[in-house]
Amino acid sequence: MYQPVFLDGDRNGRADFVKRVDKPSKLGNWSYEVIEAKLARSTKVRAVIQLCHYSLLLSKLQGADPDWMHVVLGGGKLPEKFLASHCLAYFRKIKREFEESFKASQPTYPEPNEHCRVCELVWPM
């Protein structure tokens, strides 16, 4: 399926593809796995995080986590696949930590560092 849209409250996403696999779900005797297409010649971490986000949204729809997540790379490289259970466990952790910090009641502001001089040149106070 090409560019399925996933909606879950204020969370959403649009994967490049999902493929049907022989794994039972609440949809029937099948379920889906996410495939992302990238022009890069190697898989970047941000692509795996993106796959995790889409896979979690897909999990809610089909009532089952996918077994694999896939990346199709540019330059004639072979597709790569990642064991979803390994990636999703870490993604759920960082997602929870992000959401907790986002809800923090105290204001946040970056600590001054050696690059502040660069920002002052670009955005004078």
Image (spheres, grey):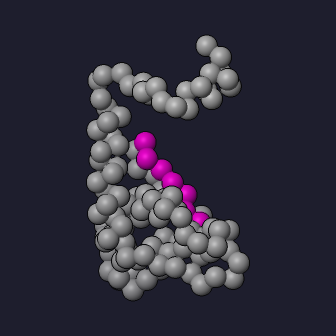
Q: Residue furthest right?
A: 75
Q: Is residue 3 left or right of residue 98?
A: right
Q: Residue furthest front?
A: 114
Q: Is residue 51 visible?
A: no
Q: Residue furthest top?
A: 125
Image location (x, y in percent) of residue 68? 41, 77
Quadrant (top left, top right, bottom left, bottom right) of the N terminus: bottom right
The residue nearer to you, when weighing 3 against 94, is 94
Q: Is residue 57 left or right of residue 70?
A: left
Image location (x, y in percent) of residue 25? 32, 75
The residue nearer to you, when weighing 21 against 98, is 98
Stretch of the chain drawn in magenta: 10-17
Residue 14 belongs to the span the image colors magenta:
yes
Residue 74 lies, with reference to residue 46, above or below; the image says below
Image location (x, y in percent) of residue 91? 35, 58
Q: Main secondary structure of the magenta part?
A: strand
Residue 7 lies, with reference to residue 47, above or below; the image says above
Residue 26 lies, with reference to residue 125, above or below; the image says below
